[in-house]
Image (spheres, rainbow, N blue to C red):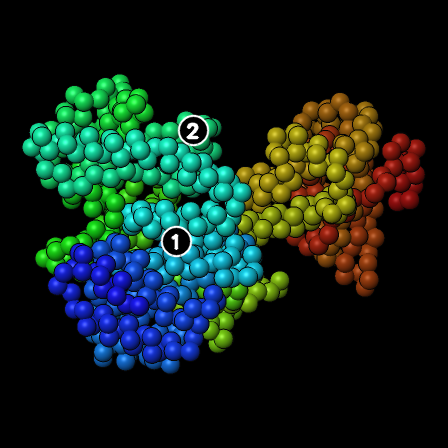
Amino acid sequence: MIEALIKATKTYLPNFDEKRVKDAFEFAKDAHDGQFRKNGDPYISHPLATAEILTSLHVDEDILVAALLHDVPEDTTRTLAEIESKFGKQVAFLVEGITKLSKVHYRNDMEERQIESLKKMFIHSAKDPRIILIKLADRLHNMRTMNAIAKPEKRERIARETLEILVPIANLLGTWELKNQLEDYCFKILHPEEFDEISTLVHRTEIKKKNILKKTLNKVTSLLETSGVKVSATEGRQKNVYSIYKKMLRTGKSFHEIHDLIGVRIIVEDVGSCYQTLGILHQAFTPKIGRLKDYIAIPKNNGYQSIHTTVFGLAGVITEFQVRTLDMHLENEYGIAAHYFYSEKKQKIMQKKFAKKYAWVQEILEMQRDIPNNKKFLEHLKLDVFEDRIFVFTPKGDVIDLPAGSNCIDFAYQIHSDVGMLATEANINGKRSLLSTKLKSGDTVLIVTSEESDGPQIDWLDGVHTTLARTRIKEFLREKDRTCVISQAEEILNQKLKVLGLGDIFELKKEQKIHALEKMKIDAWEDLLYDVGSGTTQSSEIIPLLFDQNEVLGAAKKPFYEDAYSNRNHQPLRGNPGIVHTVSIIVEGNNRIGFLRDLCNEIANLGVNVLGVESVPQGKCDSARIEFLVEIVDFKQYEVVVEAIRHVEGVFNVLKLQTPPLNPEEIIGFHKKL
Ligand code: MN
């Protein structure tokens, strides 16, 4: 059973410890004894296949051993400690990493944000790219044996998870071969008809092209040999089915337009040979204009190096050549795995490079491929390299990623603003906790909310770590301030209206408000109240806009006795006003000597003519109720008069008589009452 693995490993790791790998196999086989895969195979077939897949990436011995053992701690009675004592720290570390990754769960209805978090968590919890390589191989084998899973929904969920989480990561690590295979398996499950159609076409054209490809490879090899160029390898290239499908969708081109060309890759010893090869190719075949790309002289942003040229090849078939050195090839093809390739010396250098925390992410970023839909992911990832993150679960199992140091409030806001807004306490791993409790990776957090919550408190700002929470809390506090200001303004205005006998603020009609808003050029009633409350606008400016002057003060007419306005001894502040409203004002206050005099003085000082006064003692004569009949020019003067009266010592209430007498006869009647 294990012979194939040993053989494959020998091809690139001639000096590996064969016994150690065999021991790992036996250990795993023993541990999984009696367990079977869904397809009926003994369970050991799965870790073995996982290891075999990894040999195609030329991974090191520890990775192979870890791959063989990867499901042992999770699914058997054998422990990680046993693995460590038998196979060493490195292997135990890798196996533990895989076990942790199995706790990252994907659901079908996940939002994009959560998928992003999941990808990040995946990479974060992997800690080491080797763990991800094992996981990718593990998944590839699971995808290969997917038919054994009876439920189509489960197959689809796994395919979607693979496509959304693992494929981008495989892409990121530059492990193209794994990525392509994973993609095609997913494609087959998720779009079986399209998959069949395209793969049939691929298969058919492949047969046609095979002959030409073979001839081309032969011709190129002999051309290069006669010119003295040492060729490491030549190979025909194939696009995977899914990428053909994507390209068809993207470009709108037909399958044949995309696929009817052949691709040949030539790997040579050094950079000089690359250019020499290019010259030879261009002498032998007519190049297509504008298709020569020298990514050796000018590598792609992601570090990709190769020379590309497209020519009219044998039998007129368009042929694309890629020429590169072996080093470039390894980097380009195997990505992160290239660092575990071939010589142990090289491995050591690379491992040193990786020893630094997160250095590998840096490596990945340097090697990042220019795949547009991965751009966002990479941007996010970049941030995470510089800031430690924690990954916390919702009770449903969604992953929320937060900067390290975040507390429950950060978490609450990350879920939803309303959750933050109404949060009252938290429950961390089943234990009641304060909202200010700092979270750790792996915590499961439930935020208790209540409609009765007072909302965010100012001291929340001390503990929060995310910009989101900070912004929302500040917004709320500002809004809360605003609410206070508005309700204060409402009170002020209401009092004023009552004093002026204009009723209650809540009885204002819509038309009244709209009229005032239009005059003030303000959009919303609350904004207007805010202006009043914050002192930008005086309530005295607003009130006249809410009411019709004649309606409130009665119709305007000539003063009852015009000569009253020419009395110079009473320092009239205005001359004859022309027209006036006759208004009845009732004052209630503490009875004292000079009370009536003081009131009359105030009114007279404002140049307001008093037509009549009626004073009636109240209760035990300790208070008085005095009614003035005055001539008022306009709303503004009316308010000034009321204000002035209010400030006379002893006054505790000023009221407007709702229906003041309007004609002289009634006024005379008023006098008669006196
Ligand atoms: Mn597995």
Residue 207 pos. (x, y %): 37, 36
Residue closer to the observer: 469 or 475: 469
Q: Is residue 572 visible?
A: yes
Q: State which quadrant residue 400 falls in.
A: bottom left
Instruction: Name which residue type carries label 1.
Output: Leu
Instruction: Determine whether, in the image, residue 455 is placed left or right of residue 339.
Output: right
Q: Is residue 513 above or below residue 383?
A: above
Which marked residue is nearer to the observer: mark 1 or mark 2? 2
Q: Residues within 10 Å of mark 2 (few under 14, many from 20)?
A: few
SS for callout 1: helix
Residue closer to the observer: 630 or 170: 170
Instruction: Tell me how many marks there are.
Output: 2
Residue 166 badge:
1
Residue 68 pos. (x, y %): 30, 68
Q: Is residue 134 above or below residue 170?
A: below
Residue 202 pos. (x, y %): 41, 37
SS for callout 2: helix
1 and 2 marks in contact (CB < 8 Å) = no
Q: Is residue 118 visible?
A: no
Instruction: Determine whether, in the image, residue 219 is placed left or right of residue 375.
Output: left
Calculate the distance from the C-alpha at mark 1 to the C-alpha at mark 2.
30 Å
For label 2, the residue is 256
Q: Is residue 19 above or below residue 422?
A: below
First along the sequence among labels 1 and 2: 1
**Image point 78% across, 55% down: which residue?**
624
Instruction: Name which residue type carries label 2.
Output: His
Residue closer to the observer: 665 or 236: 236
**Image point 83% across, 46% down: which residue?**
614
Residue 217 pos. (x, y %): 22, 34
> Residue most toward the left?
228
Residue 397 badge:
none
